[in-house]
Image: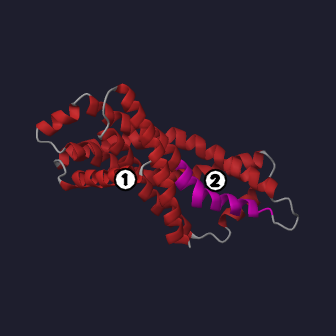
Amino acid sequence: MNPLRLLFHIGQYWLLLRQVFRRPEKRKIFWNRFFAEVNSIGIGSLGIVAIISIFMGAVITIQTAFGFESPWIPLYAVGVAARDSIILEFSPTIVSLILAGKVGSSIASEIGNMRVSEQIDALDVMGVNSASFLILPKITASIFIFPFLVCISMFLGHIGGFTLGVLAGVVTPSQFIYGIQYDFRPYNVVYALIKTLFFGFIIPSVSAYQGYYAKGGSLEVGQASTRAVVYSIIVLLLFNFILTQLLLA
């Protein structure tokens, strides 16, 4: 992308955020839309988060076990490695990348369709702050519900690793549980949740930006939805690196 074009989009993105937070709608309207978004984003994503977490926890456990072939490495190290992988990176980052595809494309297509069908223009004509009305509930709902989804992912990832790891015969129940508990650092969970809060802001805001400024027809809305997923993932990975450096380095 042209550097000047990139600077233009960054500036326009921040101007949109300023409009989002400048003049919120009435509390009753906001809370109604907030809970609707929590249901759509959170409850609607629970199934895919659960399935991915269980099987990825199992895969991490089995791959770790086969990687520790040396007899000098204790078996409980499988639980330690699986725990740290799930908490530090898999649940906060990989799950957020999955949500960027599911939630991000949905937000961009919803707002993009409203833009090309002139529904946003109608809201502006009626004196409604369309950016705040449409985008603020999505951002706040994502920031609220993403940490719950990540905590559920952590729990199910350990359950999947324990259950399928034991069934596959790569680890014993007692050794896996001991490994999970060994030298556990609560700060790792705090670190994961801090990252998740940032991701919960990035995904809906970047996706809403793409939809809000979509032009043309259904084809352009589809392209905006694709851009929303791609740019959300790029920004998410960038902030994942920055936050890791700030919080763990």
Residue 35 is one of the magenta-drawn residues: no
Mark 1 vs 2, N-terminal side = 1
Q: In this view, does 85 lie to the left or right of 39?
A: right
Could one spot residue 64 in this view of the protein?
yes
In the rendered structure, which amino acid carries the disc numbered 2? His
According to the picture, the residue beneath numbered tag 1 turns out to be: 4
Mark number, residue 63: none
Q: Residues within 10 Å of mark 2 (few under 14, many from 20)?
A: many
Q: Main secondary structure of the magenta part?
A: helix
Q: Is residue 17 left or right of residue 203?
A: left
Image quarter for residue 218? top left
Q: Which of 181 and 18 is in front in this view?
A: 18
Q: Distance between the residues labelled 1 and 2?
A: 46 Å
In the rendered structure, which amino acid carries the disc numbered 1? Leu
Residue 65 x %, y %: 78, 55
Residue 238 x %, y %: 49, 58
**Residue sitting at the far right:** 71
Q: Is residue 90 left or right of residue 65?
A: left
According to the picture, the residue beneath numbered tag 2 turns out to be: 158
